[in-house]
Amino acid sequence: MVISMGEGELHVFFFPFMAQGHMIPILDMAKLFASRGVKATIITTPANQPIFSKAVDKYAQLGFQIQIRLLEFPGVEVGLPESCQRSDQIPDDDALPSFFKACAMLQEPLEQILQELRPDCLVADMLFPWATNTAAKFDIPRLIFHGFSYLAFCALNSIRIHNPFKNASSDSELFTISNLPHEVKLTRLQVPPFQRSEVETPMTEFMKGVMESDDKSYGVIYNSFYELETDYAEHYKNVLGRRAWSIGPLSLYNRDVEDKAQRGKKSAIDEHECLEWLDSKNPHSVVYICFGSVANFAPSQLHETAMGIEASRMDFVWVIRNKREEDNGSEKWMPEGFEERTKGKGLVIRGWAPQVLILDHQAVGAFVTHCGWNSILEGVCAGVPMVTWPVFSEQFLNEKLMTDVLRTGIGVGSKEWNRSESDGVEREAIAEAIKRVMIGEESEEMRSRAKAMKDKAKMAIEEGGSSYLELSSLLDELRAYHAKQ
Ligand code: UDP
């Protein structure tokens, strides 16, 4: 199929923040726009090109208008290691401001490409707050991609305005986040440190700029769907008065095995071997455990996790990403004999897993997740109940959507926001939560609610579904804007 751009057709730039959890959905988004007749240009840095190139080449060969343009990343100029071009490569939290500084230095080279190609719209990550001014220079709309759920955005916005944690008597006392459609509670320890900090840090300052640019942008594209968080989509538009389009779940647009398997990085396991292993298991008998691309556990937490999985007595696929330098990758924390004892029952994947492929397999009965928004959506699309184990970012709020609003998840009892050394969840709690989502009446009820939401997700992206129509209305609006120029 060859799709050519007609007179008045759109050219959209997509510029994701350099983190797997942002680049993966933006790639899916660029493919989706291209499949609807838009010319899509993805902007990234040289080291991140491989994340996009295979899919882009495949799509371009099919006749869609999709391409990549590169910007040199000035990491070394701000003191970062040469190899650091992605958020999971940032040495520690103290280096975060340098990473954002290097990102801001991409403004000028980006403007050169905008000048050269003159697109009609710039979809840029929220973590590039300067992109709103950049788009204004070219008189084109700047759309924001947060990678958040509506619930998380609404809650973080309320916390920013009302600081409700200030009334809590201790770090661990629950407080209610005001003005939300449901009663959502957190503790101070679960609020992002830059939001709860008494003193202004470079990150507080940076996040202020992010929120201001959000207020000034044309609108926000959500990787969500109306039926998933209806109350919050309505609250966002009608109470907060903001413009947004929900066009997800984006991962669902990947329909064949190759597209589902090759997302982000090359898998550490051959996907056919993985599928064969799952084929040998009964439906809903395997728990899949994975904590995304950034979160890090302390060695004691990894040890406790292994003990908890074993104590649950369930079959499992466990993705272990931590290769701790101080261990020389030796996994000293691994309980002695764990892999021998669980041979046949468990599959350990060290490195990157073909997550969507695994979740979609009928043998998988539950997902133990850190509640990254992409992982949550992928679990929703697979129709599996979840054990929620938030670690950092807005994950504690995504957990609430699963456990309190949709009631398709059971919390493991994660208490504290900690990106680099998460700890404190005990084996008994892990085993108990896994058993509750995998077996028994409560599990059956959650599974049936999860299955109903999976069906709604599928309907949302089909022609005439809510996400399909929201994208149509966004494209109409962009075309009208373009026609006025
Ligand atoms: N992912 C994957 N294999 C892995 C780990 C993660 O394919 O071994 C993908 C996952 O499917 C999701 C993304 O990486 O699309 C992670 O995004 P998420 O928002 O869940 O978490 P983050 O990594 O941003 O914390």
Image (spheres, rainbow, N blue to C red):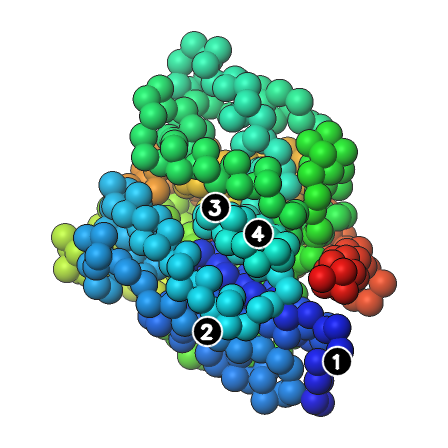
Query: Mark 3 = which residue?
Result: 129
What secondary structure is marked by label 1?
A: loop
Q: To which quarter of the image does residue 252 belong?
A: bottom right
Residue beneath the point at 39% across and 45% down: 308
Point out the tag, 1 or 3, that comes first from the N-terminus: 1
Of residues 127 and 443, the one nearer the viewer is 127
Query: Mark 1 = which residue?
Result: 6
Q: CA distance from mark 4 to mark 1?
A: 25 Å
Numbered circle sitting on residue 69: 2
Residue 242 at what x, y percent from top left?
A: 69, 38
Residue 68 at what x, y percent from top left?
A: 48, 75
Crowd class of label 1 (few under 14; some 14 to 19; many from 20; radius 10 Å): few
Residue 81 at what x, y percent from top left?
A: 20, 59
Query: Mark 4 = which residue?
Result: 136
What secondary structure is marked by label 3?
A: loop
What amino acid type should be assigned to the residue bearing mark 3? Pro
Of residues 360 and 35, the one nearer the viewer is 35
What amino acid type should be assigned to the residue bearing mark 4? Ala
Asked if disc 4 and disc 2 are in contact, CB closer than 8 Å, the reply is no
Position of 227 compared to 49: left or right?
right
Position of 393 compared to 10: left or right?
left
Point out the tag, 2 or 3, that comes first from the N-terminus: 2
Residue 73 at what x, y percent from top left?
A: 32, 63
